[in-house]
Amino acid sequence: MGYEIPLQVKNLSFAYDRQDVLHLVEGDFYQGTFYGIAGPNGSGKSTWLKLMAGLNNCPHNRIHIFGQDIHKMPRMTLAKKISFVPQMFNMKYAFTVEEVVMMGRYPYTNRMTNITKKDYDMVETTLLETNLMPLRDRHVNELSGGELQRVVIARAIAQDTDIILLDEPISHLDIHYQYEIIALLKEICRKQNKIVISVLHDLNITMNHCDHIFLMKEGQIIKQGEPLKILTEENIDEVYNLKVNMLINHDKKWITW
């Protein structure tokens, strides 16, 4: 058997109520790589992410994990492969931070009835990595938006999947936690050989921290590749209709306008 691409999207189109949202989107994703998806509002970024997470129905034989159509994978098997951090997260019940992070272990615990030492150890490690230990006994409905966002990211990390999908994971965080979470995701990606795919609005973070980006507009991928080569003044103007300037400092590039 030949080598199978860890995550592959082929000729993916999608519509809501006959309104095209994605058109022939494609991408190959490899382990140990941090991917960014960028583009204006309404360009299809979140829809693409949800389709890869198996949350929206799409045509069969379009999204594969190691050659297997995700629609043919049992839900629990898929939950051990892909974790997803949504853009918005509402928790109606007064679970503690630790309990929500433990929910990431759901695929391994027979519906949370058989929690093992490994599960507790994974949650403990994740709380430490995400600096949530001081909040572990707080109820999530008492947290700020930024604190809750960190909890949801921690839940995805504790799920210990091959692929982590994140929809604007740092949008509610202050600048300190933005860089802390991005640094943690990069470290997990490298050391644990995971695929991390994130929708990001901050082009400076996207350019300087992602390995590969997809630049989208109106449901299509306009450009993809190495961020420093893709996020040029010309491409940003084409996609965002915005004139920008590039500042270069050694191997870093910064966008100003």
Image (cartoon, grey):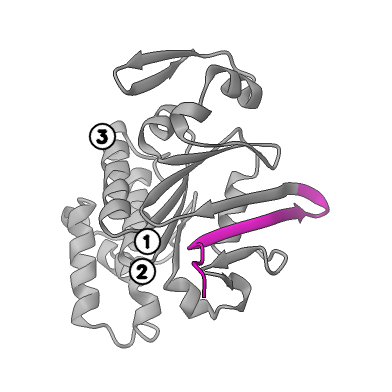
- In contact (CB < 8 Å): disc 2 and disc 1: yes
- Sequence-wise, which precedes: disc 2 or disc 3? 2
Q: Is residue 110 visible?
A: yes
Residue that numbered label 3 is attached to: 176
Residue 252 appears left or right of 86 = left
Q: Secondary structure at mark 2?
A: helix
Residue flagged by tag 2: what amino acid is it? Gly
Magenta-drawn stretch contains 86: no
Q: Residues within 10 Å of mark 3 (few under 14, many from 20)?
A: few
Residue 197 x, y percent position in the rendering: 46, 50
Relative to 61, residue 11 above or below = above
Residue flagged by tag 1: what amino acid is it? Ala
Q: Residue at x 39, y 32 (%)?
A: 205
Magenta extent? 1-20
In front: 121, or 183? Answer: 183
Magenta-drawn stretch contains 10: yes
Determine the main secondary structure of the stretch shown in magenta: strand
- Sequence-wise, which precedes: disc 1 or disc 3? 1
Find residue 156 and name its label.
1
Residue 237 x, y percent position in the rendering: 61, 19
Residue that numbered label 2 is attached to: 104
Q: Residues within 10 Å of mark 2 (few under 14, many from 20)?
A: many
Q: Residues within 10 Å of mark 1 (few under 14, many from 20)?
A: many
Q: Secondary structure at mark 3?
A: helix
Q: Residue at x 76, y 53 (%)?
A: 15
